[in-house]
Image: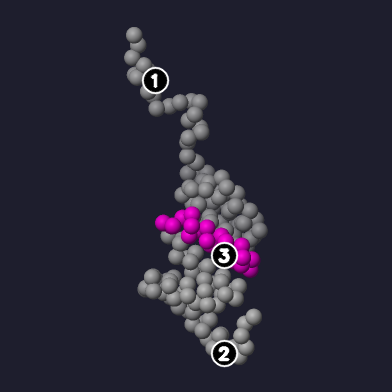
Amino acid sequence: EIDVSITTDTGFNPITSTEVTPADPVQLQAEYQQAFNLLRQSFYDQAIRAFQEFLAAHPNDRYSDNAQYWLAEAYYVKREFDMALSEYDKVVANFPQSQKVNDALLKRAFTLHELGDIETAKSQLQTLISNQPGTTVARLADERLKLINASTASSSSPIN
């Protein structure tokens, strides 16, 4: 009788090994960096497509939270605020432990302001200021809140 535990337990299965191997980290970074470079070069439509393709191929990899955030940013810069809002929400929902969550919450509030939802924007900015004291996010939230308050105080007619 042959002891099969010695002969078959090699840790390598040539049939399934390519199916379970995680993405090559170098390739993953290159794909992410390519999309990010398009954004930095102001090729927003191409960046959106590249980030969408990246997220479809790598929904939970090392750069996925950043890709999701920058996808939202590309929409924001294009002033496609409904799409930006949806993509910022995905950062919060899909990557709750990400360092990008507070940035996404901040930009979500900015987006609501752009869409004219002043009260919700103000409320979310107040929450960020309270929950993130002393951070850049809190400072930026406070600056936007002051801007909103100044513009609504000087406005003689309600925003429709």
Can the viewer see residue 30?
Answer: no
Instruction: From the image, tell me which residue sits under label 2.
Output: 154
Left or right: 76 in relation to 7: right
Callout 1: SS: helix
Distance in Å between CA atoms under marks 1 and 2: 78 Å
Prevailing secondary structure of the magenta residues: helix
Q: For the point 59% across and 64% down, which residue is it?
A: 84
Distance in Å between CA atoms under marks 1 and 3: 52 Å
Callout 2: SS: helix
Segment tinted magenta in the rendering: 75-98
Give coordinates of residue 34: x percent, y percent. 57, 52
Q: Earlier in the sequence, mark 2 or mark 3?
A: 3
User: Pointer 2: residues within 10 angstroms few (<14), some, or many (20+)?
Assistant: few
Amino acid, disc 1: Thr
Distance in Å between CA atoms under marks 2 and 3: 27 Å
Q: For the point 39% across and 24% down, which residue is it?
A: 10
The verdict on residue 91 being magenta is: yes
Amino acid, disc 2: Ser
The verdict on residue 64 being magenta is: no
Instruction: From the image, tell me which residue sits under label 1.
Output: 8
